[in-house]
Amino acid sequence: MGSIVVVTTTLPIEWTKEQILKLKTNLISQQLAACVQSDKINSTYSWEGEIVSEDEWRLTIKTTKKRQESLISAIVEDHPYDVPQIIHRQEDASPEYFNWVKQQVGN
C-alpha cells in the first residue's frame, strides 16, 4: 500500500463544463494531479450572517504528498471564491494505483 493525497475544492456552478475541463486539464498537464473528478453538488452553509444554499461544482483531485502544496497553490491562485474550500487528506491506495499516481505527477 501507498498513500496518496486527495484534495477537494468547489467552484461556482456558473462555470461551464469547458471551464472545468480546462482547469482539470491544466492541473494534469502541469503534473500537479494524476486524476481530477468533477460533479455537481448542492452546498448549504452560513456566509456573512445568511444561510445560503447553492449548486456548485466539486472537484476531487488525486496527487502525491510531494505535489500537494504546489497543487493547492495552483488552486488558490485562480480560485474565484474569497474563501475557497480546499480540503486535503491522505488515503491508503492499492500499490498499483499509488504507483500510477506517482508516475503521473512525476515522482
Image (cartoon, rainbow, N blue to C red):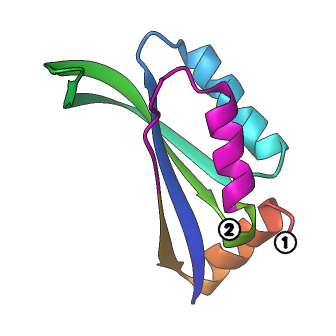
Q: Quadrant of the N terminus?
A: bottom right
Q: Which residue is mark 1?
A: 107
Looking at the image, tell me whether mark 2 or mark 1 is earlier in sequence order.
Answer: 2
Which quadrant of the figure has residue 24? top right
Q: For this rendering, which residue is in front, 32 or 51?
A: 51
Position in image of residue 31 (x %, y %) = 81, 52
Q: Is residue 76 left or right of residue 82?
A: right
Q: For this rendering, which residue is in front, 5 or 77?
A: 77
The span picked out in magenta is 68-87
Amino acid type of the residue that numbered disc 1 sits on in the rendered structure: Asn
- Contact, mark 2 vs mark 1 (Cβ under 8 Å): yes
Q: Quadrant of the C terminus?
A: bottom right
Which residue shows up at 83% across the image and 42% down it? 29
Local secondary structure at mark 1? loop
Circle 1 crowding by C-alpha within 10 Å: few under 14, some 14–19, many from 20: few
Local secondary structure at mark 2? loop
Farthest residue in the left direction? 51
Q: Which residue is mark 2?
A: 64
Which quadrant of the figure has residue 17? top right
